[in-house]
Amino acid sequence: MSALLEIVSKCNCVPDIELLAEREGLYRFLVNGDTVGHMSANDVAALKGVLKEHPRPVFNIDDTQRTLSFSDGFDDCATRSAAVAELLAQMRREKTWASLSKWRGELYPVYDGSAGVAVMVERAASYNFGIRTYGVHINGFTRSATGELRMWVGRRSLSKPTWPGYLDQIAAGGIGDGMGAWECMVKECGEEAGISPELARRGRFAGTIQYFTRSKLGLQPETQFVFDLELPSDFVPVPTDGEVESFLHLTLDETIERLRLGQFKPNCAACVVDFLVRHGVVTPDNEPDYLAIIDCLHRPLPHPAPRFR
Amino acid sequence: MSALLEIVSKCNCVPDIELLAEREGLYRFLVNGDTVGHMSANDVAALKGVLKEHPRPVFNIDDTQRTLSFSDGFDDCATRSAAVAELLAQMRREKTWASLSKWRGELYPVYDGSAGVAVMVERAASYNFGIRTYGVHINGFTRSATGELRMWVGRRSLSKPTWPGYLDQIAAGGIGDGMGAWECMVKECGEEAGISPELARRGRFAGTIQYFTRSKLGLQPETQFVFDLELPSDFVPVPTDGEVESFLHLTLDETIERLRLGQFKPNCAACVVDFLVRHGVVTPDNEPDYLAIIDCLHRPLPHPAPRFR
């Protein structure tokens, strides 16, 4: 059984990106002078090999400053995105980066300091660029007549490439292709748990969690839009798209026990802990690390964020 | 009408304490090597004058490193607290620091890196030492049969020394004298709004807000334990201790309008915005600065925090 602070720290496992970059010789990915990501020296080396043969110098790579930035002429989002797409397609064919074998066909936006989209990048390459990504996580729960809360959680399919068999929110997903968080929430509820749009729209924005994580895929600074979705007591979610093996309806005590046993995917664990904090279940009276846990769930990220219209 | 980001930034108005310390020549207050506060050069100079005549060298002041720390022999909380109390009592009599004329007779804990209490300091001097302080803020609200939320807010008495006439939570207060947050919440509900302990105990911990503010009193890095207290629709709070002039029962639209008009005390405004974020009222669909606002409400503080038992 682990302490909750250990559980949330496992998600927010890159406490100091500057230090890590220094220690591992990471390259900063710059757009208009803003750091929008980090790339490993290995990935940079492989990319350089491809660029050498490439007809157009998409990126400038500075080995002294350890930076990666767009070359002159790649000055707007459309031009950059098209060049990156072409380059990554080639790298996928040539198996330059192993990650590209898991091509998603989904574009992730990279924001610059003016909060505009600097470039769109294929999701499978987001870990290589170490860009800040965005997603939605939905806490599905029920409330009994006496006020007792229970959470609906999914068990990830054993065939999932990442965290197979681990517990997850009732629905969650990355936000790509210019979609809004609300729209994405409704879509994921339908795709992952068979929740109708009418029911999903009972969901409520409940803030965000933020962390800087690193997995075998790479670096991932991430902002998750968190939703609370109170479900009717007789509602039963249905695995729909093969990503979820089954759903469990857990009491909060059972939820906390499974958290401490490490059964949740780390960022899903963080989302559950945020739910428990916001609903007054985890408190300074039962949790010694209350303040450190809340800090860990709201880690500031150095990358520019979007403004919304 | 101000943007909400402007409103919460007014509370969290010291974005970079290191930079400020450098620019203004602030002295770091150290305990066992941890920075637990900051003191202005003027306050240090006045303190030095007193220490020169004092029989015991309570503090070491290093003008090169710009640090203030306890001298040898002042090694535990009891010894330090007694020495500081005696020193401050003298400084109050001699009017060394103007702030001490507002003596509160309430002790604030300063935590060191081991999460133990390093020293207790009279509240009126907390701004001079720039120590991290803790408080409770209670969002009192009602929910109509159709689910419409309304907030109960207090208007601060015109005789309050700070922010007279500004809007405030239904109850709020600093945590001193070794009290717990829950206990403090129940006490403040009774003292400030005539809420019975039975009713106050319906309150729920809802996380924290954190900011680093500066007022004419001095520097104030602060963690507020936030509570949501759903009140019966027929409940009417009563000004009890003279700190509140009257209470208003505002719709959320009215609350947001008064926020934007700057009618709330800055840290109370931050607490209301956090409430609106957690309850899905302020969302990325109506608030361009959604992410920056949430960051601003959860600003990490460099000072050691307590662990709870």
Image (cartoon, coloured by chain):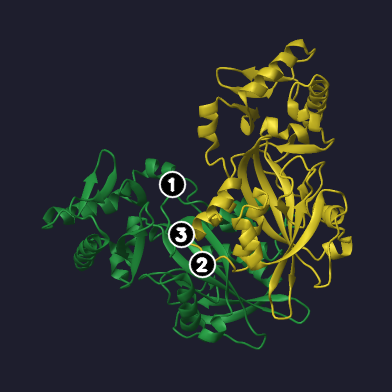
Chain colours: A yellow, B green
- Indicate the amino acid at tag 2: Asn
What is the C-alpha distance between the residues marked 1 and 2?
32 Å
Determine whether the residue tagged by mark 3 lies in a helix, strand or loop: strand
Q: Which mark is residue A16?
A: none
Q: Is residue A57 visible?
A: yes
Write the residue at 65% across / 38% down: A215
Question: Whole-percent x and y of residue B73?
Answer: 17, 54
* Residues flagged by tags 3 and 2 on a common chain: no
Toward the viewer: B40 or B83? B83
Q: Which mark is residue B17?
A: 1
Q: Which mark is residue B222?
A: 3
Q: Which residue corresponds to mark 2?
A: A286
Question: Whole-percent x and y of residue A264?
Answer: 67, 52
Q: Quadrant of residue A94?
A: top right
Categorize mark 3 by other alpha carbons within 10 Å: few (<14), some (14-19), many (20+).
many
Q: Quadrant of residue A32?
A: top right
Q: Is residue B261 visible?
A: no
Categorize mark 1 by other alpha carbons within 10 Å: few (<14), some (14-19), many (20+).
some
- Indicate the amino acid at tag 1: Ile
What is the C-alpha distance between the residues marked 1 and 3?
13 Å
Write the residue at 78% across / 63% down: A203
Question: Whole-percent x and y of residue B308?
Answer: 44, 63
Toward the viewer: A278 or B151? A278
Determine whether the residue tagged by mark 1 lies in a helix, strand or loop: helix
Question: Whole-percent x and y of residue A34?
Answer: 62, 33
Is the C terminus of chain B in the top left, top right, bottom left or bottom right quadrant? bottom left
Toward the viewer: A94 or A38? A94
Mark 1 or mark 2, which is nearer to you? 2
Mark 3 or mark 2, which is nearer to you? 2
Q: Are marks 1 and 3 in contact (CB under 8 Å)?
A: no
